[in-house]
Image: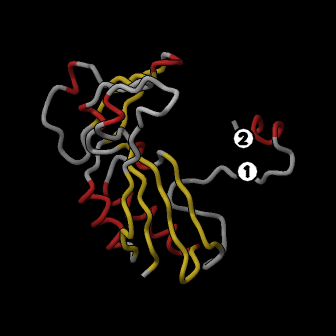
Amino acid sequence: MLEQARSKDRLGEYHHVPSGQLPFDDSSFDLVFSSFVFLEVAGIEDVEAILREMKRVLRKDGIVVFVTDSMEATKGNWVSLSYSFPENDRPLNSGDTVKLLIRDIGVTLHDYYWTEDDYARAAERAGLMVAKLHKPRGSSDDSIEWRDETTMSPIAIYVLKNV
Protein backbone atom coordinates (compact mmCIF):
# COMPACT_ATOMS: atom_id res chain seq x y z
CA MET A 1 0.00 0.00 0.00
CA LEU A 2 2.86 2.39 0.76
CA GLU A 3 4.40 1.79 -2.65
CA GLN A 4 1.05 2.54 -4.26
CA ALA A 5 0.78 5.83 -2.36
CA ARG A 6 4.35 6.78 -3.23
CA SER A 7 3.82 6.00 -6.92
CA LYS A 8 0.70 8.17 -7.06
CA ASP A 9 2.16 11.01 -4.98
CA ARG A 10 5.89 11.32 -5.55
CA LEU A 11 6.15 14.49 -3.43
CA GLY A 12 4.39 12.96 -0.43
CA GLU A 13 6.16 11.39 2.52
CA TYR A 14 4.74 8.03 3.62
CA HIS A 15 5.79 5.87 6.56
CA HIS A 16 4.82 2.49 7.93
CA VAL A 17 4.42 3.23 11.61
CA PRO A 18 4.34 0.45 14.20
CA SER A 19 1.54 1.09 16.70
CA GLY A 20 2.50 3.70 19.26
CA GLN A 21 5.95 4.37 17.77
CA LEU A 22 5.90 7.55 15.74
CA PRO A 23 9.27 8.11 14.00
CA PHE A 24 9.38 11.83 14.76
CA ASP A 25 11.10 14.09 17.29
CA ASP A 26 9.31 15.40 20.35
CA SER A 27 7.20 18.53 19.75
CA SER A 28 7.39 18.23 15.95
CA PHE A 29 3.82 19.00 14.92
CA ASP A 30 1.03 21.51 15.45
CA LEU A 31 -1.54 18.93 14.36
CA VAL A 32 -1.70 15.14 14.52
CA PHE A 33 -4.51 13.50 12.52
CA SER A 34 -5.73 9.93 12.74
CA SER A 35 -8.55 8.34 10.78
CA PHE A 36 -10.28 5.15 11.95
CA VAL A 37 -7.16 3.85 13.70
CA PHE A 38 -8.67 3.24 17.14
CA LEU A 39 -11.28 0.87 15.70
CA GLU A 40 -8.42 -1.57 15.14
CA VAL A 41 -6.98 -1.31 18.66
CA ALA A 42 -7.96 -4.21 20.94
CA GLY A 43 -7.13 -2.70 24.34
CA ILE A 44 -7.92 0.65 25.90
CA GLU A 45 -4.38 0.70 27.33
CA ASP A 46 -3.12 0.58 23.73
CA VAL A 47 -5.44 3.44 22.75
CA GLU A 48 -3.94 5.43 25.62
CA ALA A 49 -0.37 4.53 24.57
CA ILE A 50 -1.05 5.71 21.01
CA LEU A 51 -2.54 8.96 22.32
CA ARG A 52 0.48 9.43 24.59
CA GLU A 53 2.76 8.99 21.58
CA MET A 54 0.69 11.51 19.61
CA LYS A 55 1.07 13.94 22.52
CA ARG A 56 4.84 13.36 22.53
CA VAL A 57 5.20 14.60 18.93
CA LEU A 58 2.72 17.44 19.46
CA ARG A 59 3.84 21.00 20.15
CA LYS A 60 2.68 22.69 23.35
CA ASP A 61 -0.38 24.37 21.81
CA GLY A 62 -1.03 21.62 19.26
CA ILE A 63 -4.13 19.54 18.70
CA VAL A 64 -4.91 15.94 17.87
CA VAL A 65 -7.87 15.22 15.61
CA PHE A 66 -9.09 11.69 15.23
CA VAL A 67 -12.04 10.19 13.40
CA THR A 68 -13.70 7.01 14.61
CA ASP A 69 -17.12 5.39 14.78
CA SER A 70 -19.71 7.02 16.99
CA MET A 71 -21.37 5.08 19.76
CA GLU A 72 -24.52 5.12 17.60
CA ALA A 73 -22.83 3.55 14.57
CA THR A 74 -24.17 0.04 15.19
CA LYS A 75 -27.72 1.33 15.70
CA GLY A 76 -28.28 3.14 12.42
CA ASN A 77 -29.34 2.32 8.89
CA TRP A 78 -26.55 4.00 6.93
CA VAL A 79 -26.03 4.69 3.22
CA SER A 80 -22.46 3.40 3.10
CA LEU A 81 -22.28 0.97 6.05
CA SER A 82 -24.27 -1.91 7.46
CA TYR A 83 -23.96 -3.32 10.95
CA SER A 84 -26.89 -5.70 10.40
CA PHE A 85 -25.28 -8.90 11.63
CA PRO A 86 -26.70 -11.23 14.31
CA GLU A 87 -23.49 -10.97 16.38
CA ASN A 88 -24.08 -7.22 16.75
CA ASP A 89 -27.56 -7.68 18.28
CA ARG A 90 -26.45 -7.40 21.89
CA PRO A 91 -25.61 -4.68 24.36
CA LEU A 92 -22.07 -3.58 23.54
CA ASN A 93 -19.35 -3.18 26.13
CA SER A 94 -16.00 -1.44 25.79
CA GLY A 95 -13.60 -3.56 23.78
CA ASP A 96 -16.26 -5.75 22.16
CA THR A 97 -15.85 -6.51 18.48
CA VAL A 98 -18.50 -5.48 15.98
CA LYS A 99 -18.95 -6.63 12.42
CA LEU A 100 -19.70 -4.22 9.60
CA LEU A 101 -20.08 -4.20 5.85
CA ILE A 102 -18.84 -1.39 3.65
CA ARG A 103 -21.68 -1.50 1.13
CA ASP A 104 -20.12 -0.02 -2.03
CA ILE A 105 -17.15 -2.37 -2.09
CA GLY A 106 -18.64 -5.39 -0.31
CA VAL A 107 -15.89 -5.56 2.32
CA THR A 108 -16.71 -6.97 5.76
CA LEU A 109 -14.64 -5.82 8.74
CA HIS A 110 -14.42 -6.53 12.45
CA ASP A 111 -13.76 -3.47 14.60
CA TYR A 112 -13.48 -2.73 18.31
CA TYR A 113 -16.14 -0.74 20.11
CA TRP A 114 -15.07 2.09 22.43
CA THR A 115 -17.33 4.59 24.19
CA GLU A 116 -17.01 8.35 24.37
CA ASP A 117 -16.04 7.94 28.04
CA ASP A 118 -13.32 5.44 27.06
CA TYR A 119 -11.78 7.94 24.66
CA ALA A 120 -12.08 10.85 27.13
CA ARG A 121 -10.42 8.86 29.94
CA ALA A 122 -7.65 7.57 27.64
CA ALA A 123 -7.01 11.12 26.40
CA GLU A 124 -6.86 12.47 29.95
CA ARG A 125 -4.44 9.75 31.06
CA ALA A 126 -2.30 10.60 28.02
CA GLY A 127 -2.19 14.28 28.99
CA LEU A 128 -4.73 15.44 26.42
CA MET A 129 -8.19 16.96 26.85
CA VAL A 130 -11.27 16.56 24.66
CA ALA A 131 -11.88 20.11 23.45
CA LYS A 132 -14.68 19.20 21.04
CA LEU A 133 -16.60 16.16 19.87
CA HIS A 134 -18.23 16.52 16.46
CA LYS A 135 -20.89 14.14 15.19
CA PRO A 136 -21.65 15.40 11.68
CA ARG A 137 -25.06 14.67 10.21
CA GLY A 138 -26.42 14.76 6.73
CA SER A 139 -28.85 17.44 5.59
CA SER A 140 -31.93 17.21 3.41
CA ASP A 141 -30.20 19.82 1.21
CA ASP A 142 -27.39 17.37 0.38
CA SER A 143 -27.30 15.61 -2.97
CA ILE A 144 -27.30 12.22 -1.17
CA GLU A 145 -30.49 10.50 -0.09
CA TRP A 146 -29.45 9.91 3.49
CA ARG A 147 -31.02 7.30 5.69
CA ASP A 148 -30.43 7.73 9.45
CA GLU A 149 -27.52 10.13 8.79
CA THR A 150 -29.88 13.12 9.18
CA THR A 151 -30.85 12.22 12.76
CA MET A 152 -27.61 10.74 14.10
CA SER A 153 -24.02 10.27 12.97
CA PRO A 154 -22.14 7.05 12.28
CA ILE A 155 -18.84 8.85 12.93
CA ALA A 156 -17.30 10.87 15.72
CA ILE A 157 -14.55 13.45 15.26
CA TYR A 158 -12.56 14.18 18.41
CA VAL A 159 -10.49 17.33 18.80
CA LEU A 160 -7.97 16.98 21.65
CA LYS A 161 -5.86 19.73 23.14
CA ASN A 162 -2.43 19.30 24.62
CA VAL A 163 -2.64 20.09 28.36
Q: Nearest the camera: 58 or 3?
A: 58
Per the rendering, the mark at residue 64 is: none
Where is 71 relative to 22, above or below? above
Residue at 32% of width from left, 52% of height from top? Answer: 43
Query: Image quarter for residue 148?
Result: top left
Instruction: Say if 160 sits above or below 74 in the image.
Output: below
Disc 1 + disc 2, Cβ < 8 Å: yes
**Image check: 32 left or right of 107?**
right
Q: Residues within 10 Å of mark 2 (few under 14, many from 20)?
A: few
Q: Nearer the viewer, residue 95 or 142?
A: 142
The amino acid beneath tag 2 is: Leu
Return the x and y of residue 54 as percentages of the image width and height.
52, 67
Q: Is 98 positioned to the left or the right of 7 in the image?
A: left
Percent across and percent down for residue 48 are 37, 64
Q: Does 24 appear above or below 66?
A: below
Number of labelled discs? 2
The extreme left residue here reads 91
Residue 29 x %, y %: 64, 72
Measure the alpha-carbon separation of dots 1 and 2: 7 Å
Question: The C terminus is located in which quarter?
Answer: bottom left
Q: Which residue is painted at 36% across and 36% down in the image?
A: 111
Q: Which residue is mark 2?
A: 2
Q: Secondary structure at mark 1?
A: loop
Q: Residue at x 41, y 37 (%)?
A: 138
Q: Say which element carries label 2.
A: helix
Q: Residue beneath label 1, please?
A: 14
Location of residue 78 in the rendering, given as x and y in whole percent from the top left corner: 36, 26
Q: Quadrant of residue 140?
A: top left
In the image shown, does 75 or 143 lie closer to the viewer?
143
**In the image, farthest residue toward the right:** 10
Q: Residues within 10 Å of mark 1 (few under 14, many from 20)?
A: few
User: Identity of the amino acid at label 1?
Assistant: Tyr
